[in-house]
Amino acid sequence: MLFDTDVLIWALRGDVNAAKVIDETENRYISAVNYMELMQGARDKTEQRQIKNFLAALEFEVLPINEAVSHRASIFIEEYALKSGIQLADALVFATVCEHSQCLCSANQKHFRVIESLESKVFKPHASKA
């Protein structure tokens, strides 16, 4: 399963539902885009190290942006940008999911529901967490 950035952020903040879905998944993936979003969102080098340690401890594999992913993301942009507002980062993540025959775990259903070929699992964070 490929985890979207939002689920990883929930897990890093201690959300029990995020921890559970990650723990219950045997093969854990993120796209290179998810990795970059996490690093970009870190407030300092300590947070960057914590993120890297978190990903390593849970054995996440980072899937690269290759020619096939780029091509599929371009098709998603052409097909969905005008009618649904899909953005570049999401198109690359969705293309990575499809190219690697994975299921996307994300709470941002509105971003991916227009892509019928994308297998997904909607994540819901624990109600008491903000």
Image (tube, helix red, strand yellow):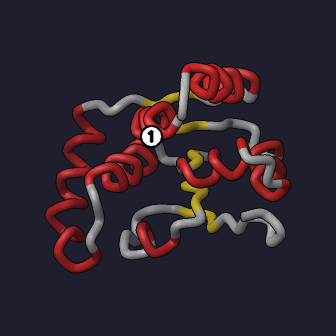
Looking at the image, residue 106 lies above or below residue 116: above
Percent across and percent down for residue 80 are 23, 70
User: Which amino acid type is marked by label 1?
Assistant: Glu
Q: Residue furthest front?
A: 44
Q: Residue at x 53, y 38 (%)?
A: 30
Image quarter of residue 86 = bottom left
> Circle 1 sits in a helix, a strand or a loop, which is it?
helix
Q: How many marks?
A: 1
Q: Residue at x 64, y 52 (%)?
A: 7
Looking at the image, residue 130 lies above or below residue 8: below
Looking at the image, residue 6 lies above or below residue 62: below
> Dot 1, crowdedness within 10 Å: few (<14), some or many (≥20)?
some
Q: Residue at x 54, y 34 (%)?
A: 43
Percent across and percent down for residue 23 are 82, 43
Of residues 13 and 66, the one drawn nearer to the viewer in this rendering: 13
Q: Is residue 55 left or right of residue 58?
A: left
Of residues 122 and 126, the one drawn nearer to the viewer in this rendering: 126
Q: Residue at x 40, y 53 (%)?
A: 94
Identify residue for label 1: 37
Of residues 84 and 25, the one drawn nearer to the viewer in this rendering: 84
Image quarter of residue 129 = bottom right
Quadrant (top left/top right/bottom left/bottom right) for the C terminus: bottom right
Percent across and percent down for residue 9 are 63, 47
Percent across and percent down for residue 53 are 69, 21
